[in-house]
Each structure stands twice: as C-alpha cells, then as structure tokens.
Image (spheres, rainbow, N blue to C red):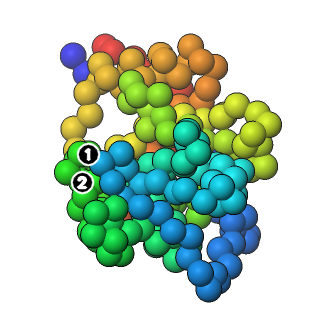
Amino acid sequence: MYTTALVNELEITALKHPEHEAETVREIELKIKASLGEKGVLVSSPEDIEGFSLRGYGVSENKKLTLTFYEALFLVSKNILQVDDEKTGKEVSFQNLLRRFQLVDEDAWVKYLIYRDLRSRGYVAREGFGLGIDFRVYERGEYGKETARYLISGIQEGKPVSVEELARTLKYAQSLKKKLVLAVINRRGEVVYYSLSQLTLK
C-alpha cells in the first residue's frame, strides 16, 4: 500500500508576504507587563487586555487575559511584553519562557516558528481545534468580522506523519468548509505552506 497526496504549493495570496508587513511593531518605552504562573502567562491591566483582545491575542476571563505560550514568546521577541515570574518577581527571558513551555509541549518550538511567521505576514492566528489543527488563520482585516478561512497543521521536515491522522485532519477541515494548509518547517527553520485538497490510499 502506498499513499498519494494531492498537495499543491500554496498559491493563496492570503499567506504570501505583502510588500510591507501589515503589522508593524513600533518602539515602546514601557513594555506591557504579564506574569508567569501555574495557569500560564496572564495580563491584568484592563487597558492592555482590551488592546490585545482587539488584535487577536489571548483569551479574556475573570478580568485577566491568558496568552498562549507562542503568543507570549512572539510578543516578548518583539519587545512588546515583559513576563515576570509570579513567585520571584524576576523577569523571565525568552529562552527560559521557551524552556518552560517545551516541558508541556514537545512541539513548542515548531508551533512558535509557524505562529511567528503567520503574524509577520500580517495575519491573526488563533489556537486550533485539536485533531491535528494547530491554528485558525483569518484573512487580513477579517478578525472579529468573519470566521477563520484557513486551518493550519504544522509538520516538521523529516518527521514521520501518520497517513491516517492526516486523512482525519483533512476530513475534519472539509466538514467545517475550511481550507487545510500544511505548514512545513524545513531544516533551516523556514516555513513553507502547502494546500492539501485530497488524500488517496492505493
């Protein structure tokens, strides 16, 4: 038995680099503060919660905003966010934050690379639904107005992928009437996108 996958290099304009990045990070004298505790990275300032929420970051609950690890890493890398340890009060570096999340997710670095790439292209990427879906991606300017158009599944080059799992993910995406996109991380850490339209077992 062998597998034939109809995978096309993504030609969708939505995931191509624009001439100028849609999201330009300006210099900020005072970084937004967040705390790292058992429940993750939390932002407490109402003003900052509103600002992040409008830009498609985090989940607001009980007057706090919880950021995913890749959101926090991205914001720290852009010098927008400062994460302090809840217990010691000391600033947590990018590397220490990454190590913390690698303990709970072995694919932490891969997901961060994909998330960073999507954000750098000007797209809002939100957490996926599971079942092989890592991210939901919105067209530029559509976040908060329309549902996500693309579902992203991350794959590391050279790492085996279960055909059954891939077929299940594709079927799930099609049932939601979404386009499934494979984000492949090559050995240089670059992200290449492919659209997957059909998977046939022979």
Give the label on residue 102, or none.
Answer: 2
Does dot 2 land on a helix, a strand or a loop? Answer: helix
- The residue at 75%/39% (across/down) is 144
Q: CA distance from mark 2 to mark 1?
A: 5 Å
Relative to the observer, which residue lies in front, 123 or 71?
A: 71
From the top left corner, tell me how far across and down residue 169 is, in percent: 42, 23
Question: Would residue 115 appear left or right of 12 to someone viewing this image?
Answer: left
- The residue at 59%/18% (across/down) is 176
Is the Cβ of the residue at disc 2 closer than 8 Å to that at disc 1? yes
Quadrant in the picture for the N terminus: top left
Question: Would residue 66 appear left or right of 86 to someone viewing this image?
Answer: right
Instruction: Classify mark 1: residues with Cα within 10 Å, few (<14), some (14-19) or many (20+).
Output: few
- The residue at 31%/13% (across/down) is 202
Give the label on residue 105, or none.
Answer: 1
**Quarter of the view holding residue 151:** top right
Give the label on residue 138, or none.
Answer: none
**Quarter of the view holding residue 162:** top left
Does dot 1 land on a helix, a strand or a loop? Answer: loop
